[in-house]
Amino acid sequence: MKKYLSLVTFTHTIFAMPFAFIGYFLAVTTTSFRFDWEKLVMMILCMVFARNSAMAFNRYLDRDIDSKNPRTKQRDIPSGRISPTSALTFTIVNCLLFIITTWFINNLCFYLSPVALLVVLGYSATKRFTALCHLVLGLGLSLAPIGAYLVITGQFALTPLFFSFAVLCWVSGFDIIYALQDEDFDRSENLHSIPAWLGKVNALRLSTFLHVLSALFVIAPAFLTPVGFGYLYYAGIVFFCAMLIYQHLLVKPNDLSRVNFAFMTTNGIASVVFAVFFLLDRLWIR
């Protein structure tokens, strides 16, 4: 179990899971649909299965690349802790579990499940042909809030889309920061990334732009939707934006020593605290 949790870097679930809770409780508190423990559990299972399959497939597909990169050669497959066959089997099992779980939720989630898997698994191949791979990763995680909203309602709406766009820009921006570590390696292996394409300075500028867009998308629901938000939500916005700014203060083109802290700790705290403020605000209003 520890090997497979390491394979999928399970701690990184902290990025998208809080936004799934935002989508779920947005639906519960703004529509006529009631809170449902069973659906909440199935939503969480879908998040876990989808992410497990995406990360395991990424490790499987990148095993030869990872073995050449000094930063990643100690990952589970290159180091021999998990075989490629086991990783691929783990991917397939989690894909099937994801689809089966959506079947018990509602028809729309079930019909869209292959599309969701295509997005989250497809990301792994994109670095081989486009520098926009970071946006594809962001798109995969952005399915969390709208997907969780669909678990409850079975229908699309405007407000959860703002949160999905916020996640898309937020994740894409911090993935660009994370990719700064591999700029030289990506160029040497003809892999595509924003840092390898634009260089460190311009990559950080693009990351900043994406994070500005992310901030605007978390602000937008308070002004562009009929959903009523209180002061706790605004406090969450302030904290989220402050953490975006802070991670850009940590990373400089000539100093990447704090990239991992900016990537994992800063963004993990940002997502969890923002979700907590959101949930407190919704429960306070209710």
Image (cartoon, rainbow, N blue to C red):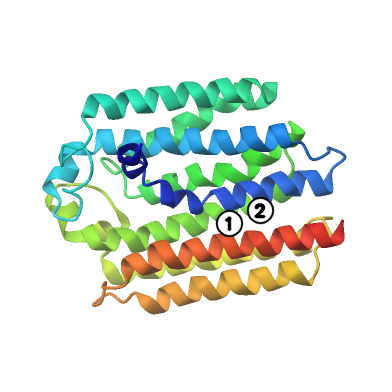
Amino acid type shown at disc 1: Ala
User: Is residue 210 visible from the viewing direction of this image?
Assistant: no
Given residues 135 and 282, the one toward you in this image is 282
Given residues 28 and 196, the one toward you in this image is 28
Amino acid type shown at disc 2: Phe
Q: Is residue 259 above or below residue 71?
A: below
- Within 10 Å of disc 2 (Cα), the crowding (few <14, some 14-19, many 20+) is many
Quadrant in which the N terminus is drawn: top left
Q: Position of residue 118 (x, y in %)?
A: 45, 29
Q: Position of residue 93 (x, y in %)?
A: 41, 22
Instruction: Say whether marks 2 and 1 touch (CB < 8 Å).
Output: yes
Left or right of residue 89: residue 114: right
Given residues 114 and 16, the one toward you in this image is 16
Left or right of residue 181: residue 23: right
Callout 1: helix, strand or loop? helix
Callout 2: helix, strand or loop? helix
Question: Alpha carbon of mark 2 to alpha carbon of mark 1: how far?
Answer: 6 Å
**Mark 1 sits on what residue?**
166
Question: Which residue occupies 88% across, 39% down?
Answer: 32
Question: Which residue occupies 25% across, 77% down?
Answer: 255
**Mark 2 sits on what residue?**
162
- Within 10 Å of disc 1 (Cα), the crowding (few <14, some 14-19, many 20+) is many
